Amino acid sequence: MSYPPNIHQDDNKDRMIEVIKQYPLATVISVENNLPFITHLPLIYKSGKLIGHIDKSNPHASLLKENTPVTIIFSGPDCYISPSLFEKAELPTWNYIKVHLQGTVSEIKNENEVKQSMVDMTSFLEASQQAYVLDYNNPSMDKFVNYVKGFEIDIRQWEGKFKLSQNKTPEARDIAKQQLISKNESSITPFLDRII
């Protein structure tokens, strides 16, 4: 049985891929000795696989070995929905978008392919701005590639969790939608002093 209820489940793969593309920082979860090991890494989606790289000095790198299972979570926008927003009595709730994936890992052993995956990732993350282009032939790439482990994840199971007040009236859904937009635009404010 999955939770939240079916009304909040979304098996539309295109929508899930859009979440992955818009929010590429993944929570990567491996298990060793019955304990979870968690790392946050950007991953890009390509032809049914997730592609990334990890610093070899990260202890998680040793767990990302051939054919090992891994769980990945992509987190979209989320926020608290207060009953005070509605005219009709409602209960407090939390709206969110998440994509949970299960897959198996394979290492990218060819250094040229690892370099190309880094170029591809930079190009994807730069997207419309294209302010920076990572040059495959940049001499520092040859040094840097020795410090990372490239890998890809073959996705075996998809689960979309889009809890967006689907069980409410159209008017209440619109209020919750506006709250989600507003809260996610302002949520960085408390952390600005850490960025500057």
Image (tube, rainbow, N blue to C red):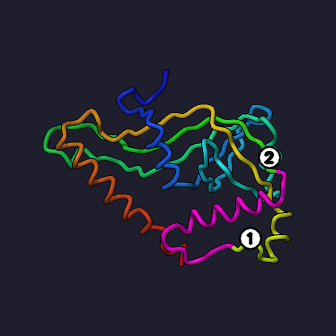
- The mark tally for this picture is 2
What residue is shown at x 64% (from left), y 53% (from top)?
40
The stretch in magenta equals 109-134
What residue is shown at x 22% (from left), y 47% (from top)?
174
The percent position of residue 167, horizontal first and vertical second, equals: 27, 32
Q: To which residue does mark 2 refer? A: 107
In this view of the protein, which residue sits in the foreground, 187 or 54? Answer: 54
Residue placed farthest to the top in the image?
A: 1
The percent position of residue 73, horizontal first and vertical second, equals: 57, 43
What residue is shown at x 77% (from left), y 42% (from top)?
106
Residue 11, quarter of picture: top left
In this view of the protein, which residue sits in the foreground, 30 or 152? Answer: 152
Q: To which residue does mark 1 refer? A: 136
Give the residue type that dot 2 points to: Glu
* In magenta stretch: residue 120: yes
Secondary structure beneath dot 1 equals loop
What residue is shown at x 70% (from left), y 63% (from top)?
118
- Magenta span: chief secondary structure: helix
Instruction: Answer with mark 2 or mark 1, whichever residue precedes in sequence.
Output: 2
The percent position of residue 109, horizontal first and vertical second, equals: 84, 51
- How many residues crowd mark 1 within 10 Å: few (<14), some (14–19), many (20+)? some
Give the residue type that dot 1 points to: Tyr
